[in-house]
Image (cartoon, rainbow, N blue to C red):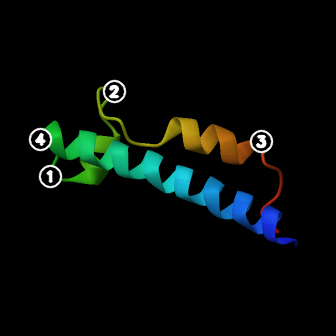
């Protein structure tokens, strides 16, 4: 992989982590103290549906 490809991959991973962080901050701000319970609530920003959808279309992981 060339340098530009590697940088693009790192940027994509950072964007994913930023999405996860924002969702976790929103859950904490909403008063969630149990992420497992929160994830079953329709008002909770977890699970990360946008990220999961992106990963589902990315193809196989191996």
Q: Is residue 47 above or below residue 11?
A: above
The answer to whether mark 4 and mark 1 are in CB contact below 8 A is yes
Residue 10 in the image, given as x and y percentages of width and height: 64, 64
Which of the numbered marks, if any, corresponds to residue 56?
Answer: none
Q: Identify the image quadrant of residue 8.
A: bottom right
- Which residue occupies the extreme right position in the image? 1
Query: Badge 2 is on which residue?
Result: 42
Which of the numbered marks, if any, corresponds to residue 33?
Answer: 1
- Which label lies toward us, 2 or 4? 4
Return the residue nearer the eye: 52 or 39.
52
User: How packed is label 1: few (under 14 Cα within 10 Å), some, or many (20 or more)?
Assistant: few
Q: State how far apart marks 3 and 1 are (Cα).
A: 31 Å
The answer to whether mark 3 and mark 4 are in CB contact below 8 A is no
Which of the numbered marks, if any, corresponds to residue 31?
Answer: 4
Which of the numbered marks, if any, corresponds to residue 57?
Answer: 3
Residue at horizontal 33 percent and vertical 27 percent from the top: 42
Q: Is residue 13 left or right of residue 35?
A: right
Secondary structure beneath disc 2?
loop
Q: Earlier in the sequence, mark 1 or mark 2?
A: 1
Residue 48 in the image, given as x and y percentages of width and height: 48, 42
Q: State how far apart marks 4 and 1 are (Cα).
A: 6 Å
Return the residue nearer the eye: 2 or 45.
2
Q: Earlier in the sequence, mark 3 or mark 1?
A: 1
Q: Is residue 14 left or right of residue 57?
A: left
């Amino acid at each position: 992989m060339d340098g530009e490809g590697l940088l693009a991959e790192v940027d994509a991973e950072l964007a994913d982590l930023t999405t996860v962080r924002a969702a976790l901050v929103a859950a904490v701000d909403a008063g969630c103290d149990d992420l497992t319970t929160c994830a079953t609530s329709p008002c909770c920003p977890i699970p990360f549906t946008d990220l999961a959808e992106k990963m589902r279309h990315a193809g196989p992981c191996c």
